[in-house]
Image: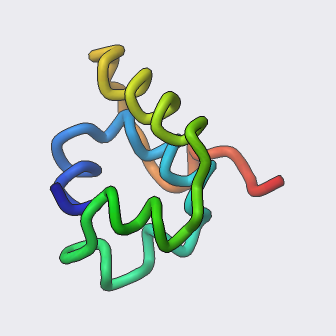
Amino acid sequence: MTLAELMERFPQSMPALYKHFGASCFECPGVADETVELGARVHRVEEEFWRDLLDAVSSGEVSEVSLDSLPGET
């Protein structure tokens, strides 16, 4: 599954992507072709990313998610 497909199908995954990949993920043209696995390797994310992503997707809670509603980078 590409990152774009993930965000389209599971918009609740966007905060986890933002937290672990950064804001550039949403502006990168590579999201259309880059798989979630490749993105995780490229960004050298830890196991915490996979837990956060699984929790977000399995929660089933889909609310309006926009870049403006995502937390700032720390």
**Looking at this view, is 10 or 40 the one in front?**
40
Toward the right, the furthest residue is 74
* Image-based side of 47 in relation to 35, left or right: right
* Image-based side of 63 in relation to 8, left or right: right
Toward the bottom, the furthest residue is 29
Q: Position of residue 28 (x, y in %)?
A: 41, 81
In percent of the image, x 31 and y 82: which residue is there? 30
User: Relative to residue 55, is residue 15 depicted above or below?
Assistant: below
In percent of the image, x 76 and y 57: which residue is there? 73
Q: Position of residue 22 (x, y in %)?
A: 61, 63
In percent of the image, x 38 and y 27: which residue is there? 54
User: Relative to residue 27, is residue 9 depicted above or below?
Assistant: above
**Looking at this view, is 59 or 44 the one in front?**
44
Locate residue 59: give its quadrant: top left
* Image-based side of 56 in relation to 51, left or right: left
User: Relative to residue 40, is residue 32 depicted above or below?
Assistant: below
What is the quadrant of the N terminus in the image?
Answer: bottom left
Q: Position of residue 13 (x, y in %)?
A: 39, 39
Locate residue 53: give its quadrant: top left
